[in-house]
Image: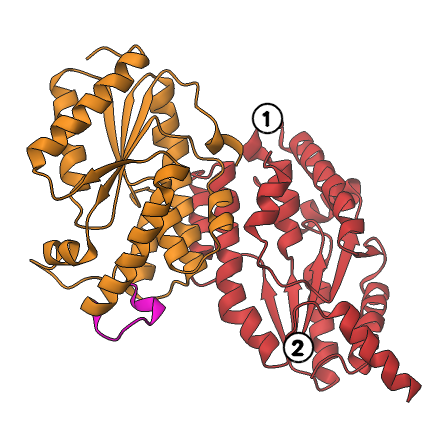
């Protein structure tokens, strides 16, 4: 898998959080970010599907339901490649701690849940940099549905409506997100993801994450 | 009886995609005369009363606008360049090419995945990675390759456009700060890559310096042969 199978040699550190929507990963990475900031560390936060190059196009195409499993996959890969070259790599070269809210594992889980070939999508992201730490927030799709639906209906792609699993977006969401969660669980060993039980308190989860992060920073001689 | 058996054999050997229609590709670098040949061939096929549709590289409703804009703003790196073209192709494949093939059309491709193989290899990507990227692409029934030497390409493009295109000159990969020499180096590398693919994918190589009419005659003879064999159902 080209780059992705080996450890990077940059002075910085790359840390990512993964999990289905409503698993609490964004809350955790934001807490981590502000903590590192308060310690005056060189740190940046990058989000999935946020590149200047393509994020708006993808969002528009999603609104119009124009995407197939493969085009969905490719457009997200474009977004990732753009952020990798313009944000992540330069920051790592400059010795930054790079925090990524979702990383390639999101693509591996979602695209395969959309019946894209797992080997194909892993090869697609072969140019990615292997993270130093990857946390997976394990939550049941029912609990995640409750969280995201407190203020809205699940989105078309989020609910996997393109997969024609059910006409009911709520039912479809649970079936589809279950498929994604299954893919994540299959990857725990494959990519050494650190599993975090989403049911734990915010405080307890953050303590655990900080401890792991400190370990990795120390190993890479980054002082905070 | 004998003729029929022969027909059957041709079908089995060459029709890898399994659709009713026929997939014909014309490949070559910029200025090799592809588009002219595609137009002439399309007219010929329609005159023969077969359905025919043309799909050009980088024309998907989903993504072609993004590519053009990003090129203008100089926002592309070699990976996003490669992936955007793959997305463009995939969108056309799913929405234009496969539906037409299923409906029994002859689908003419002005450039196909080989263009990506060539351009992405020249831009430093591992050919294995690129091949995986396009691994779901249906195999064409005929691939014509218009081979034109670089010296003639340059003259044609200057006469046609007045300028040498930034990307067609490979300026994005910093081969030279001089457009002319960058174009020369880039196009020569592209020709080398095409040469490698020629054998692997059974290209029918044509001397692109011949006249349009001569080339058309050669192309249409091959297409007619396949049509007459009952290839399209």
Can residue B91 be seen here? yes
Disc with the residue nearer the chain's start (2 vs 1): 2
| Residue A164 belongs to the span the image colors magenta | yes
Instruction: Say which of A51 and B127 sits in front.
Output: B127
- Identify the disc placed on residue A16: none
Q: Main secondary structure of the magenta part?
A: loop
Secondary structure type for disc 2: loop
| Residue B115 belongs to the span the image colors magenta | no
Where residue A64 sits, quadrant-wise, is bottom left
For mark 2, name the chain: B
Residue A154: x and y in percent read: 19, 62
A40, above or below A162, in the image: above
Q: Share a chain, discs 2 and 1?
A: yes
> Nearer the observer, disc 2 or disc 1?
2
Q: Residues within 10 Å of mark 1 (few under 14, many from 20)?
A: few
Residue located beneath label 1 in the image: B177
- Identify the disc placed on residue B21: 2
Can residue A156 be seen here? no
- Asked whether, in this view, residue A31 is left or right of residue A196, the answer is left
Residue at coordinates 44% horizontally, 63% vertically from top-left? B61
A206, above or below B144, in the image: above
Chain letter for red, please. B
Where residue A206 sits, quadrant-wise, is top left
Chain letter for orange, please. A
Give how far apart the Cα atoms at labels 2 and 1 are: 46 Å
For mark 1, name the chain: B
> Which segment is the magenta one?
A160-169
């Amino acid at each position: 898998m080209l780059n992705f199978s080996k450890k990077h040699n940059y002075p910085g550190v790359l840390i990512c959080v993964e999990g289905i929507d409503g698993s609490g990963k964004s809350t955790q990475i934001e807490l981590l970010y502000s903590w590192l900031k308060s310690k005056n560390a060189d740190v940046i936060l990058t989000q999935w599907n946020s590149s200047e190059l393509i994020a708006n196009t993808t969002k528009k195409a999603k609104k119009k339901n124009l995407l197939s499993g493969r085009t969905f996959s490719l457009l997200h890969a474009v977004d990732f490649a753009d952020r990798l070259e313009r944000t992540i790599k330069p920051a790592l070269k400059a010795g930054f701690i790079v925090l990524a809210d979702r990383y390639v594992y999101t693509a591996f889980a979602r695209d395969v849940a959309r019946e894209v070939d797992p080997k194909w999508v892993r090869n697609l992201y072969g140019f990615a940099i292997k993270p130093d730490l990857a946390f997976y927030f394990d939550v049941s799709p029912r609990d995640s549905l409750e969280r995201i639906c407190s203020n809205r209906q699940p989105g078309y792609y989020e609910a996997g409506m393109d997969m024609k699993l059910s006409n009911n977006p709520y039912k479809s969401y649970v079936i589809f997100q279950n498929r994604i969660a299954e893919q994540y669980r299959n990857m725990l060993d494959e990519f050494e993801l650190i599993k975090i039980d989403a049911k734990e308190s915010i405080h307890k989860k953050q303590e655990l994450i900080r401890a792991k992060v400190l370990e990795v920073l120390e190993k890479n001689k980054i002082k905070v | 009886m004998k003729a029929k058996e022969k027909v059957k054999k041709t079908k089995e050997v060459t029709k890898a995609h399994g659709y009713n229609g026929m997939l014909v590709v014309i490949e070559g670098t910029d200025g090799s005369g592809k588009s002219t040949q595609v137009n002439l061939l399309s007219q010929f096929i329609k005159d023969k009363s077969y359905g025919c549709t043309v799909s050009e590289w980088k024309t998907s409703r989903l993504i072609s606008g993004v590519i053009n804009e990003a090129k203008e703003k100089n926002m592309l790196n070699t990976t996003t360049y490669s992936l955007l073209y793959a997305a463009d192709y995939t969108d056309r494949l799913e929405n234009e090419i496969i539906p037409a093939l299923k409906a029994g059309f002859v689908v003419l491709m002005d450039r196909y995945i080989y263009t990506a193989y060539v351009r992405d290899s020249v831009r430093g990507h591992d050919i294995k990675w690129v091949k995986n990227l396009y691994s779901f692409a249906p195999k064409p029934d005929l691939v014509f390759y218009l081979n034109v030497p670089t010296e003639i390409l340059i003259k044609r493009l200057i006469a046609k456009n007045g300028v040498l295109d930034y990307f067609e000159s490979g300026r994005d990969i910093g081969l030279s700060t001089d457009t002319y020499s960058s174009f020369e180096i880039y196009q020569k590398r592209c020709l080398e890559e095409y040469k490698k693919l020629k054998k692997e994918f059974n290209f029918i190589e044509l001397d692109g310096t011949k006249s349009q009419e001569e080339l058309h005659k050669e192309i249409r003879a091959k297409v007619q042969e396949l049509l007459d064999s009952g290839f399209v159902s």
